[in-house]
Amino acid sequence: MSNATTQLAVIGAGPGGYAAAFMAADLGLKVALIDPAENPGGVCLYRGCIPSKALLHVARLIQEVKAAEAMGLQISGLKVDTDRLRDWKADVVNRLTGGLGQLAKRKNVTHIRGKARFADNRILEIYDNGDQTGRLTFEHAIIATGSHPISPPGLDISSEHLWDATAALDLPAVPKKLLVIGGGYIGLELGTVYAALGSRVQVAEMTPLLLAGADKDLVRFLRKTLDERFEGIHLETTIKSLKAQKNGIKVTFSGAEEEAAKPRLFDKVLVAVGRRPNTKELGLEKTRIEADERGFIPVDKQCRTAESHILAIGDVAGEPMLAHKATHQGRLAAEVVAGRKVAFEPAAIPAVVFTDPEVAWAGLTETEAKEKSISHQVARFPWAASGRAGTLGRNDGLTKLLVDPESERILGVGIVGPGAGELIAEGVLAIEMGAVAGDLGLTIHPHPTLSETLMEAADVFYGVSTHYHAKKR
């Protein structure tokens, strides 16, 4: 390209960026979507959400096959063809990103391949492989550049045996011994994949808990399963040193465990300790926009930055760094540019960890309620009392409600078990609509389903659950 103009320039084509571009186009705006990839999708579709969930689906199938013997099914000779698995994953990604490319054309969104950098608050310079290819003058812009994996100081050594999440998702090999540094959702999801594929997985987490921020009631179910599938989980443990060798990486730990100080050799080490927003190379210094100390761009409820005609969404606009939050903000930002009176004010943003069992929550957690001294009552329905869970051979679940004892409004929902990520949407809707526990309890749910556990948890609150005895309020 050379010099061009547009009403709206969207920088980054991830779930937030392409959602913003498509929505703006639907509202009649002239839109340019700038991203280095051939098609929209961003990290989520190319190197994150989608490939990881494809591999997690395979991991779950492997575990289900192994568990089938308890149901009277004897299945032998299970083998994993990693080359075919890698090709299948790539096909899923290519089909979805290719479909988005076709959608962009149908919506008349101009897709500009390259990276954008602000020349000033009205002009973007476009670069491809380091060379400037043109300039784009815009009326409005939306920054949607996402984030990248980070590595703590001292752990960023040069070795083919050291992976980040992107490298691990490429499935370059199935190591015999894998160390995952970080007990957050990325580390546990990828650890689940490789454990199912045959790796002996160990996890090192510096805090006292896995999935910091998640409800302890939910995590204990997952921890029980991980203890069976992982070779070791080391909490309150940090990495003292990594030493690259031809046959792997020698790791020295420092932590509460007696054996922590002994160096151990791993074939591969996966660093999954978090992500940082992509704001450094945007040329923000040419505008009035200033990122904070963590790299996030401050925005108001309309996603506007210090330059009111430039908006920011998704990972660059702050926590939580979740694809569905970015999508929602992207659509809202497009409406703002189109002149609509809207604001980003969600009552709940769901979070899902796609391990096995899955962990999902929305709204207030019990820990947050206690820390903030918010009056609440907890209602728990164990899946051991669920008929559907029994037919699946999966009693390792729990549905939990946090309820305001006075108004009876639902403050938070937490679910652990297979399919928790699908079930949590009903909880999100209940919180957004200001539903009371009685609304869930009086809603007829199909039987036998796991969705009934939400209804039964509401009945537990009133002490009238059909399948679980609980004291009346």
Image: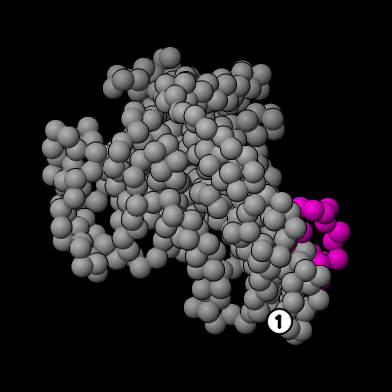
Does the stretch in magenta take in 327? no
Question: Considering depth in this image, is 296 or 244 the residue closer to the camera?
Answer: 244
Tally of numbered discs: 1
The three-letter code of the residue at mark 1 reads Pro
Q: Quadrant of residue 124?
A: top left
Residue 11: image x %, image y %?
A: 46, 33
On screen, residue 246 versus residue 45, left or right, reads left
Residue under the image location 49 percent in, 78 percent down: 371
Q: Quadrant of the N terminus?
A: top left
Determine the residue located farthest toward the top in the rendered image.
Answer: 1
Q: Is residue 345 left or right of residue 447?
A: left
Q: Is 450 covered by the magenta stretch?
A: yes
Q: Is residue 154 left or right of residue 125?
A: left
Dividing the image into 4 quarters, which one contains the C terminus?
Answer: bottom right
Q: Which residue is mark 1?
A: 405
Q: Horizontally, is 126 left or right of 324 in the view?
A: left
Closer to the camera, 223 or 218?
A: 223
Q: Secondary structure at mark 1?
A: loop
* Residue displayed at 75% across by 58% down: 387
24 and 190: which is toward the camera = 190
Instruction: Where is residue 459? Give x, y as percent.
Output: 78, 72
Q: Which residues are magenta?
A: 436-453
The structure residue drawn at horizontal position 55% and vertical position 52%, both measured from the top left corner, is 357
